[in-house]
Image (tube, helix red, strand yellow):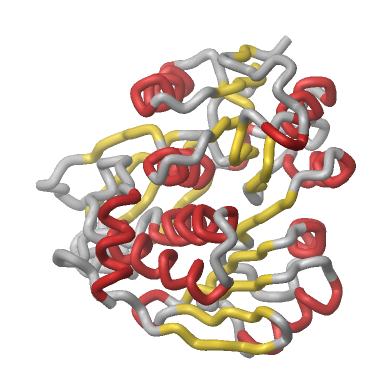
């Protein structure tokens, strides 16, 4: 049985769906370690003066928090363990007012370690032992939530790939984030080809334009966006590739963790409100820059009023 909080009842009519954005997957906890440099040279030990802190928040959590901060009615679906880490995730959603459907995970809640350098760059270590190849979202739960949603954002985590056909059958628009895909790993392809909006990082791409055009040609995406950190973002829409410069951060950069999730959430808020892809990406660059000024130990996001004010100033 799923642990379900605030699942909409009959609000599935196209004229008034109760959920603006359903977020699938990406719930978990991160342990944040600030290191003197990256890559970290080998040593028997390091003394971490800033502390080692564990907090709720992985990619799906960050997107859900950011969407909610921008005023979208958001619901999060994922597996969680009956463990202290799962309690942290539940508390985050409760505190942020985000409805959560938690499917019990006997293997425990997903976790990761983020090494953060002085310049805000990070190296993430993901524990993949918290999933099983046969994990599946209960189809009745998935259909009920998708049927009540305008849009679904699908994290690149097990078992979200198996949910893609059901989501398409339910008629919701889809987005996904391929993160640092190299353009070749076949695991990412079902996500890339099923989504209407595809996000990815340009960090591992030899030829970003070629990869973006291949995603659009082989899948159903009407917009493909590659984020490039302080170099901005590349947006492919209507067969035209456009480069947007990075938005200036409003404060010193301390951590890039969550910047891509913030970009995606701000883009989706604008896109779901019928803004153009380029205008949506502008909002994304502003939210991503804001996220880089937030310490990794915090899970907060830019609000709509601030986002609009910064966009008007550019």
User: Which residue is pictured at 54% across the width and 13% down the height?
Assistant: 82
Q: How many marks?
A: 0
Residue 197 appears in the picture as rendered = yes
Question: Which quarter of the rendered picture does the N terminus lie within?
Answer: top right
In the rendering, at what x and y percent does residue 8 appear? Answer: 65, 19
User: Which residue is pictured at 35% across the width and 78% down the height?
Assistant: 246
* Residue 275 left/right relative to 150: left
* Residue 306 left/right relative to 252: right
When the figure is inspected, residue 277 is found, relative to residue 166, above or below; the finding is below
**Quadrant of the rendered structure where residue 21 is?**
top right
When the figure is inspected, residue 268 is found, relative to residue 112, above or below; the finding is below
In the rendering, at what x and y percent does residue 3 appear? Answer: 62, 12
**Quadrant of the rendered structure where residue 95 is?**
top left
* Residue 84 left/right relative to 46: right
In the rendering, at what x and y percent does residue 12 appear? Answer: 75, 27
In the rendering, at what x and y percent does residue 162 appear? Answer: 83, 41
Question: Which quarter of the rendered picture does the C terminus lie within?
Answer: bottom left
């Amino acid at each position: 049985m799923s642990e379900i909080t605030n699942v909409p009842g009959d609000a599935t009519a196209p004229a008034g769906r109760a959920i603006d954005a359903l977020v699938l997957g990406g719930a978990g906890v991160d342990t944040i370690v600030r290191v003197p440099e990256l890559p970290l040279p080998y040593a028997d030990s390091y003394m971490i003066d800033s502390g080692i802190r564990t907090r709720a928040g992985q990619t799906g959590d960050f997107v859900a928090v950011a969407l909610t901060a921008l005023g979208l009615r958001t619901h999060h679906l994922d597996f969680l363990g009956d463990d202290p880490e799962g309690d942290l995730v539940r508390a985050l959603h409760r505190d942020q007012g985000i409805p959560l459907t938690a499917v019990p995970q006997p293997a425990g809640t997903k976790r990761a370690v983020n090494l953060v350098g002085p310049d805000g760059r990070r190296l993430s270590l993901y524990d993949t032992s918290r999933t099983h190849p046969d994990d599946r979202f209960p189809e009745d739960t998935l259909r009920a939530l998708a049927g009540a949603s305008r849009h679904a954002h699908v994290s690149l985590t097990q078992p979200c790939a198996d949910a893609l056909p059901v989501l398409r059958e339910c008629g919701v628009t889809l987005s996904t984030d391929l993160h640092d895909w190299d353009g070749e790993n076949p695991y990412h392809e079902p996500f890339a080809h099923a989504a209407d909006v595809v996000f990815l990082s340009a960090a591992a791409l030899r030829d970003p334009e070629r990869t973006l055009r291949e995603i659009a040609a082989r899948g159903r995406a009407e917009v493909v966006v590659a984020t490039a950190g302080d170099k901005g973002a590349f947006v492919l829409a209507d067969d035209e590739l456009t480069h947007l410069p990075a938005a200036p951060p409003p404060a010193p950069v301390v951590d890039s963790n969550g910047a891509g999730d913030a970009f995606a959430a701000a883009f989706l808020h604008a896109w779901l409100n019928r803004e153009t892809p380029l205008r949506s990406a502008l909002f994304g660059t502003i939210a991503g820059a804001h996220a880089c000024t937030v310490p990794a130990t915090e899970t907060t996001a830019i609000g709509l009023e601030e986002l609009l004010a910064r966009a008007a100033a550019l």
